[in-house]
Amino acid sequence: MKLPIEIRNNEPPPILGSWRNLNILVLSWLAFLILLFYAFTLYFS
Amino acid sequence: MTPLDWIVMIATVIAIPSFGLWRGRGSKTVNQYLLAGKTMPWYAMGLSIMATQASAITFIATTGQAYVDGMRFVQFYFGLPIAMVILSATAVPIFHRSGVYTAYEYLERRFDAKTRALAAIVFLIQRGMAVGLAIYAPAIVMSVIFGWPDRLTTLLIGIVCVIYTTKGGIPAVTWTDVMQMSIIFSGLIFALITVVSLMPHSVSFADAVYLAGAVGKLNAVDLHFDPNNRYNLWSGLIGGSFLALGYFGCDQSQVQRYLTGKSVAQSRLGLLFNAMAKVPMQFFILFVGAMVFVFYLFIPPPMLFEKTAMTAIAGQRQYSQVQNHFDSAWQRRKAAAEALNLARKHDDETRVQASIAEYRAAQKDIESARQSGISLYEKSAGQNGFNDTNYIFLSFVTKYFPVGIIGLVIAVIFTAAMSSSSGELNSLAAVSVMDLYRRHFRKEASDHHYLLVSRIFTAAWGAWAVIFAQYAKNLGSLVEAVNRVGSFFYPVLLGAFVLAFFFHRVRGSAAFWGMLVGEATIIACALFTNVAFLWYNVIGAVVVIVSGLIFSMAQASDPPKLSVMSSGGMQAD
């Protein structure tokens, strides 16, 4: 299994400096939402 | 509806496509018509992706879902951001730099013509039926709520949609989607404000949230793993990721959105914007449904929200008994909710606990009464699986919303139907022209010819969608079957694309047979197991990949086809 060449030639994102940082932001946002919704579920049930 | 509602609705429905046509004017080449000349900014793509996914019925049904079942449906979307991150790093740069018009064109470059044709035909069958239903579903709801003739409604939605999609191509579709999503967001905010303001004065927003949560309507996250349970954290994260990978990575109606980006970076950003906005948006829609539930704690709801079903059971012998049970259960629940609210205000913990127990028991009682009403209808109609969740929100809106806002909400429903249909029509035309017409019937022709044919195919698919919608009522259970088709085919397409992207030694025949084995496995799962459908996406994709690799090893003596990935990128035309 090898990464295609198109994936390896990356342009930087317009914000946060790298795609890695942006991906971390998105996944952290998801984790935050899940935790928030879980707390919401526990608190109101 | 009042004249003001009609004015708001008609003005919105006409103004938005007009704006799209104006912004998308000047599609002079097939590249501009199908890919917007690759000029779209990230926010337009992100909103267009969201608009294409959110059909009218999603908007109507999701609020009803929260009313009946609480907010656990939000977990269905937890896999989406994960899929967006993966696709933005893989599919977006691959498709973009390969210069393809369709996702399936890439499959031929990587594998062979038969794999491309199989994927294209699967897409056309699935989307061809879905686009008709996208128009039909809101029309049937309107016909029950307002008594509008459903055939006329489908015709009107279809005509407006076909005009702007055929004339403006994907630039018009995308800019229309941007406006449509803005209207949808505004409509949702208005809906929440209105429903909260309609509560009795003694019930604050915090009280309303508490009352919804006390009977499990705010159960957004369920940590228990159960493969037969459709919505829990694990099925959402794992099954939902695979489903979203299949839909956003392999369905041309979505792939085409991010192929229009100015650059790979803009397209990636568009997907990541969707990743961040989608889950909160779905949570918000469900929350509106939960607030509608609280509203009906204090105002009597109909036993069944579908008027025709209520009319059908009204003449039944047991009707008055069931209705009396429902009415007394509602009175009991109202009293319990008020007692609970009062106990909370007095900070009396003993009374709070006692009131909660009574409130929950009353909720069970009213659910049981409603179930009796449903059973009565099913018995009289001779059908099982009656579901009126699609009617809950609209029935509430038309009865209690202020003048003008009703028109806005109905416009939201129409624009949501048009935004998903227009994206689908444009992608159906792209696949028909690029993967079939140009590939198999007319390989060498002028750009003007393909532009003209693209317009003809868009109009033809639009006509098909309207005709399909006209007769959808007579299709009965086929409608349900069509809605499940996506879960049967996306995993197979996803498996094929994973093989194409990451396993360079796998060739066309191995991928083709792997797809067939994967499809057979999904059908077997559906027929012989109780596994929830979200898991088909995981099982199907894994089976395609594994069997594709096994077939590939068996054919290892054949030389591999040159892949586009080693060519340093190809350009469309």
Image: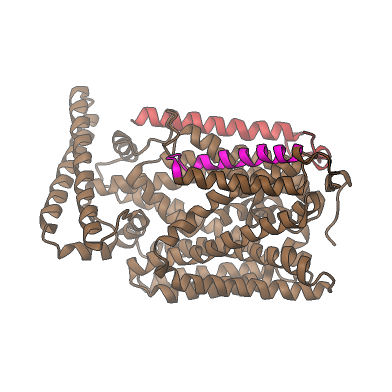
Chain colours: A red, B brown
Where residue B526 sits in the image (x, y, percent)? Answer: 47, 46
Image point 73% across, 62% down: which residue?
A: B435
Secondary structure mostly seen in magenta is: helix
The foreground one among B327 and B131 is B131
Occupied quadrant, residue B139: bottom left
Q: Which residues are magenta?
A: B528-553
Q: Is residue B532 magenta?
A: yes
Q: Quadrant of the C terminus of chain B?
A: bottom right
Q: Measured along the vertical axis of the image, is residue B113 above or below residue B539? A: below
- Identified at 34% across, 39% down, the residue is B217
Residue B381 seen: yes
| Relative side of B274 to B438, left or right | left
On the rendered image, what quadrant is the N terminus of chain B found in?
A: bottom left
Looking at the image, is B27 positioned above or below residue B62?
Answer: below
Q: Is residue B437 left or right of residue B159?
A: right
Residue A5 point in image, percent of width and height: 84, 40
On whether residue B517 falls in the magenta region, the answer is: no
Residue at the top extreme, as displayed: B350
Q: Judge whether residue B186 can be spotted in this image.
A: no
Q: Which residue sits at x=75%, y=72%?
A: B451
Number of numbered discs overlaid on the protein picture: 0
Q: Nearer the viewer, residue B425 or B192?
A: B425
Q: Position of residue B488 (x, y in %)?
A: 54, 50
Percent x, y of residue A36:
48, 30
Image quadrant in which you'd find residue B368: top left
